[in-house]
Amino acid sequence: MSILLVTSSPRGAASHSTHVATDLAHKLVAADPSNTLVVRDLVANPLPHIDPDYSTGIYTPAEARTPRQAEVVGVSDAVLDEVFAADTIILATGFINFNISSTLKSWVDHVARSGKTFSYGEGGPKGLVSGKKVYIVLASGGIYSEGAAVQMDHAVPYLRSVLGFLGMTDVEVIRVEGVGMGADAVAAALAKATAKVDAIAAANTDQAAA
Ligand SMILES: Cc1cc2nc3c(=O)[nH]c(=O)nc-3n(C[C@H](O)[C@H](O)[C@H](O)COP(=O)(O)O)c2cc1C
């Protein structure tokens, strides 16, 4: 199994999403010695925002692209190669201003490519990225899985929509939520997330042994 870990928190070493997602990635690798891990750190190496050269370049045949178009489309191609090569994708993000981090949004912008990851046919849109297992690890100061703030969660519904549009429908969410509510809340949120990580890792270990 090839695992792709995408981290995107702007909070560096303090990031809960990076910590929990990295823990999950390492435990999945340990579940089967043949598993491999690729890490894309969107904070250390942010992707460029898509721009006019990108928006034109992706609709221009490769041989007719300007050098700048070829460069920016090449960035997207490299990101797509990682996505298509992965069996399992772990997306880690902090909940930033009621949505995913802007660096992860930029990753989505490079992944959603007409003719590559989705197409339009007679039956409407078709996702072209199939057979992936996706884990979303989302850390948030407040609680958005239940209660009054549910409708303010623009992160999980957005990711489920865009990933589903691209064909990635097997999506599991691990929340580290309520971390803005004091030390006890942080400990409880991390314990709950880690229990979920351990359950996922154990299931993968059993599967590898079967
Ligand atoms: C710039 C910024 C904006 C944030 N916006 C929100 C928000 O809208 N709602 C919320 O519940 N928490 C918000 N938080 C708190 C983060 O969700 C929380 O710190 C979370 O742990 C971030 O994920 P990380 O630990 O992976 O970095 C914000 C934090 C930062 C730094």
Image (cartoon, rainbow, N blue to C red):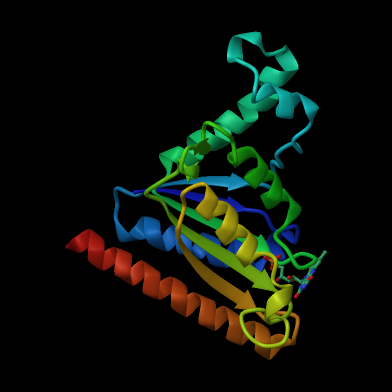
Residue 43 in sight here:
no
Please determine whether, in this image, residue 158 is positioned above or below residue 51. below
Question: x, y (%) of residue 38?
Answer: 49, 44
- Report the side of 47 relative to 187 (left or right): right
Residue 129: quadrant of the picture: top left
> Looking at the figure, which quarter contains the C terminus?
bottom left
Residue 54: in sight, yes or no? yes
Tell me which residue sits at (57%, 36%) in the image.
Answer: 79
**Nearer-the-camera pick, 95 or 157:** 157
Identified at 64% across, 30% down, the residue is: 75
Q: Residue at x 42, y 39 (%)?
A: 85
The number of numbered discs placed on residues in the rendered structure image is 0
Pick the front one: 4 or 120? 120
Tell me residue 130's x, y (percent): 40, 46
Residue at the farthest front position: 122
Identify which residue, 13 or 189, lies in the foreground: 189
Which quadrant of the picture is home to ligand 1?
Answer: bottom right
Residue 188 lies, with reference to residue 83, above or below; the image says below
Q: Residue furthest left?
A: 210
Outermost residue to the bottom:
184
- Determine whether, in the image, residue 205 is placed left or right of residue 103: left
Residue at figure coordinates x 58%, y 45% from the top left: 40
Q: Quadrant of residue 61?
A: top right
Left or right: residue 199 versus residue 68 is left
x then y, percent, for residue 109: 67, 42
Q: Is residue 36 above or below residue 189?
A: above
Please state the horizontal and vertical placement of residue 172, each as a whole percent of the image. Answer: 47, 66
Q: Quadrant of residue 147?
A: bottom right
Note whether 156 is above or below 185 in the view shown.
above
